[in-house]
Image (cartoon, coloured by chain):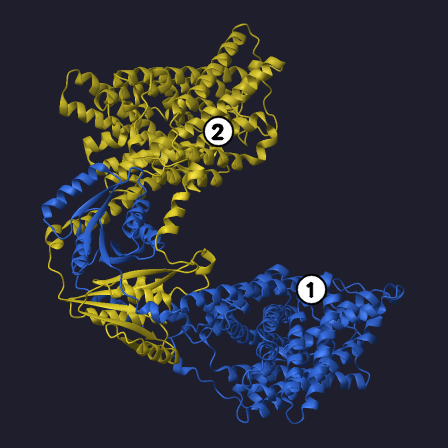
Chain colours: A blue, B yellow
Amino acid sequence: MKNKLLGPPLDTDELENERLGIPTALAVFSSDCISSSAYATEEILRVLVIAVGLAAFSLVVPITVAMLVVLFFLILSYRETIKEYPTAGGAYMVTRDNFGLLPAQVAGVSLLTDYVLTVAVSTAAGTAALTSAVAALRPYSVEISLFFIAIIALGNLKGVRESGKIFAIPTYFFIGIMGVLLLVGFYKMGVGHLAPQAVNKKGMLKLGSIGNGFAYGAGLYVILHAFASGGAAVTGVEAISNGVTAFKKPEWKNARVTLIIMGVTLGVLFLGLSILSTRVHSVPFDSGTPTVISQIAKQVFGAGLFGNLLYFGLQAGTMLILVLAANTSFADFPRLASFHAGDNFMPKQLTKRGHRLVFSNGIIALAIAAAVLVVATGAKVDRLIPLYAIGVFTSFTLSQAGMAKHHITRKEPGWRRGLFVNATGAVLSLIVDVIIAVTKFTHGAWVIIVLVPVMVLLLVRLNRSYESESDQLEHDVHTAVTAPVLRRHVVLVLTARLDQSTARAVQYARTLVPDEMRAVHIAWDRDGAAHLAEEWSRLGLTRVPLELVDCPDRRVARATLEYVASELADGQTEVTVVLPHRVYRHAWQRFLHDRTGEEIAEAMSGLEHANVTVIPYRIGDAAPTGAAPEVAAMRRQD
Amino acid sequence: MKNKLLGPPLDTDELENERLGIPTALAVFSSDCISSSAYATEEILRVLVIAVGLAAFSLVVPITVAMLVVLFFLILSYRETIKEYPTAGGAYMVTRDNFGLLPAQVAGVSLLTDYVLTVAVSTAAGTAALTSAVAALRPYSVEISLFFIAIIALGNLKGVRESGKIFAIPTYFFIGIMGVLLLVGFYKMGVGHLAPQAVNKKGMLKLGSIGNGFAYGAGLYVILHAFASGGAAVTGVEAISNGVTAFKKPEWKNARVTLIIMGVTLGVLFLGLSILSTRVHSVPFDSGTPTVISQIAKQVFGAGLFGNLLYFGLQAGTMLILVLAANTSFADFPRLASFHAGDNFMPKQLTKRGHRLVFSNGIIALAIAAAVLVVATGAKVDRLIPLYAIGVFTSFTLSQAGMAKHHITRKEPGWRRGLFVNATGAVLSLIVDVIIAVTKFTHGAWVIIVLVPVMVLLLVRLNRSYESESDQLEHDVHTAVTAPVLRRHVVLVLTARLDQSTARAVQYARTLVPDEMRAVHIAWDRDGAAHLAEEWSRLGLTRVPLELVDCPDRRVARATLEYVASELADGQTEVTVVLPHRVYRHAWQRFLHDRTGEEIAEAMSGLEHANVTVIPYRIGDAAPTGAAPEVAAMRRQD
């Protein structure tokens, strides 16, 4: 099944990354960042039009520019990070390196929550791009989003090796067609052909009046609120710093160039769309569709055949790049989770590479978390936005502050300039973070503000559990391994009835050379016990005498446990409990028999020095010729 | 938990039945039978009023009398059965004894389906009695029925030892208050004070006109259909024959007297209610409530305070006896299922007495099946009735035919009279069975007609599986037990890392005296493997050298299996796989670690002569002093 769905298993040796040139790297790492332009302007407008009505269109560009200033400093900051941490420059690693494990947990958990949100927001926005163009699909938004999550998760479980090629086409297609939109848009604006669309259509947000917001002195608050919504635009900037090792040599230089191209592209698209929106008077719809970008494209491209083609092309491109953006999180989340787990702050299973060499457990966890979010919010971008970006700005703050500390500690050439850049980046990130937390608090941000510390506490507790466990396990191993064996070894063959499976157990027991050996029957049914004793005595097995243990309350596992415990009471005895185990060919056959054997084995695992040996006996095979059929079946699976 | 819910476990010795006198026995065994009078008249009317309108009231009494004739012969027949099979006179046993195992499966399965239906019908009718009196509860019929099923099941899992006393009160209360209803009713009828109620109220079934049914020559069909619905009245007659051993001595004589009292009581109540219904003109409601018996009681008792008291008393009594009737099936179903299982036709677990000496698995199976039926039919009696009574008449037919054969074979004194009685019983049962099957076929009876043969086929298949299994298991056991041990014994200590739990495994392994012994590490991570090898060499354990097994595809369980299989390849080797097993105190800790050990143990059970010994190592206990804490904890539970 696994082989069919995911392909053959990969060997660990095949874990060699392809090295990416700048054009491919841009495609691989920038989809999350660049695709934000598809919804950032809309989310700013969503806050503004309700509060200040048409005045929104004079505020959206300044707010966009303010966000681009933040972006500018983040790009500069990450240029430093890439240079200083060319092998692992994620927020977790940088924070751990400079501030220690606990702050690293905060940075890591913040980023993890944001990766989950990236998947949810991107698939929801991708779905909105689709349903803006094809209105008939609107009732199925949640299902479509879940479908996207499922195929991305499956693709990642398979381990998408040919990623570069797959990513390049939609990314460059999106950039290209957005370029066409901006060119045509600005041309029409220049020659005065771009008319505002009618506002107050059914389903559009109701325009507020200027008085509403400003009369009460709340003007600044509205602007900060809108700015906070725009914060979603700069998520994904950190992606390149996580993956410097994937670049062609010289890695850090190529990564820096790619980072700048990415930043400029995002800036141009974001600013261009915001400017066009002021002319088109695009107003977000309550339901999220048609999107602002779709309204702009309709107005810019016009209604002709060629215009329609371009319009649908843009919607398709938007959808694809957004889905790719979700894919970026599927690469980052499992890797980051494996860092946490490697430091004993998350379940160890997250460090394990699966069938196809990817961190399968992390992929599955991310898919489930994002799917829950999509269902809970009805796949609506505007409901997800308030939760978004807090985490990413928290991790920006910590990682840039870490970089600042790094410069102060190391004092390498040019450290003063670096310190200025990173300190500015940290301060700006912190300011944005606080703005988002305050203005979005009641809209849902509180969830993240509560969740992150709770998660960090849980991880710390988990870490303590792991540490105390490994303390115990690793304490004085040398002495334990070479410790003398116990004085007495007793072998007990548990016997329910006299049949082939018991016979096998007895045959095995007779290969052992213990100090004492006997068969034990827990007598929950006296007639049966007497019958067994009679049969046994006829066998003449002097080496394995049968002992009957009375068990009037029929709790066989418990009686066995007490019997074995009394053997162990002297503290100098090693007991081997030999347990006949019938193995059935079909799963349904197992349900036709009771689980007493399993219960006994489970109960026994609580007793130190009570060692259960399971003797398999296969039911339904004609010839008991050992391993052959099973191994053959195993080989056939490939 | 189990102890709290069910009380302390009972010893097998306590399996001694209380012996019942006739009054108590009547209460214990007759609730199913007598309680049928609460819905039988209604179900006959339900068919008639739709087809023939008010003419129904002239047909209901003759149909009731026809059913009482059937009842009469069944009582006579079962008097024979009780005498001839005083220890186990159920249909299964009688059929098996006279016709063999396969027909017995048919009789048994038929009865089992009917026991499930008895629970569903009785709890639904009991709920209807309650909701007839308390209209506010009507929307919660399903929940109330499920609640009844749950408490009866729980009571039976506890093992209701004081059954006699519990049963007597509601049974005699019901009989008494029904007696009052009939007396007052007939008195008022006699003096002309019992007026017909208004018909065609909202929710009542719409009256048909005579023409509807008879004009098309379908008159006979309607009558047979109504008769088939009345068949539900005589279910439960067999109960006494199943439990003759519970009577005081002379058992069979007391049982016969009780049987006759039961039959007469049912006959009087059923006939009396049918007669009163003709005067009251009680018409069933579409929703099932208020019930016909509730309508009659309202009309007979009148609206005064005293009348109201009697009315509510009757409804309460009806509800209680119907719930008791369901309880009867909870005694019979598990016992019958244990007979099937004892003959290897049902899963063995059904023969196992649980914590409180009852057949817990049968009780749980019955409760689940009945709950499913209640939910599927919305707890409506009229939807369940078409499925009902087919099974019971099938088993009547088989068991009476078996009795007839018994008389012919044995030719004991008076066998001719017995033959006549049982043959008549068999023929009548068969006729009723066919009538029900034909007239109710499209109303749901087809489900049972399809289900019973399918179930019988499944049981036969199950039987073959059990038989071939025990053939294999019991074949030549003596030789197998005394067979020589294999030539070579190899001990392999599976080692993931060097820690205390591995150290314990090595310590245990060193108590063994095999021909070969080594530690095996499946190297899914080369650096880790090299590190382990280095540490191991420093230990200087010459008796347990370490072998590294390459495993590039990280499928550890599979690599282990292949390694062990190659050791076994000569067919002369016994392998003991020593598996360190870390035991955690809390369940959540288990989820923080992978399941590789369990996977290995499971994979290995497919290999003959690959015996896995699990060496427990407890995590989180300060002092590894062996058994003490676990056993103490176990004792504390009591």
Give the secondary structure at mark 1: helix
Rendered location of residue A606, percent (x, y):
36, 54
Do the dots labelled 2 and 1 sit on one chain? no
| Amino acid beneath label 1 | Ala
**Does the image show residue A199?**
no
Q: Quadrant of residue A196?
A: bottom right
Q: Which residue is mark 2?
A: B125
Task: Please tell me which residue lies in front, A515 or B456.
Answer: A515
Q: Give the quadrant of the C terminus of chain A.
A: bottom left
Which numbered mark, 2 or 1, is in the foreground of this view?
A: 1
Residue type beneath disc 2: Ala
Q: What is the chain letter for disc 2?
A: B
Rendered image quadrant of residue A392: bottom right
Tell me if B269 is positioned left or right of B93 in this view. Answer: right
Pick the residue in front: B206 or B71: B71
The quadrant in which the N terminus of chain A is found is bottom left
**In the shown orientation, is residue B250 left or right of residue A404?**
left
Judging by the rendered image, the residue that carries numbered circle 1 is: A445
Residue A306, x across and y down, in percent:
67, 81
* Subunit that carries the residue with mark 1: A
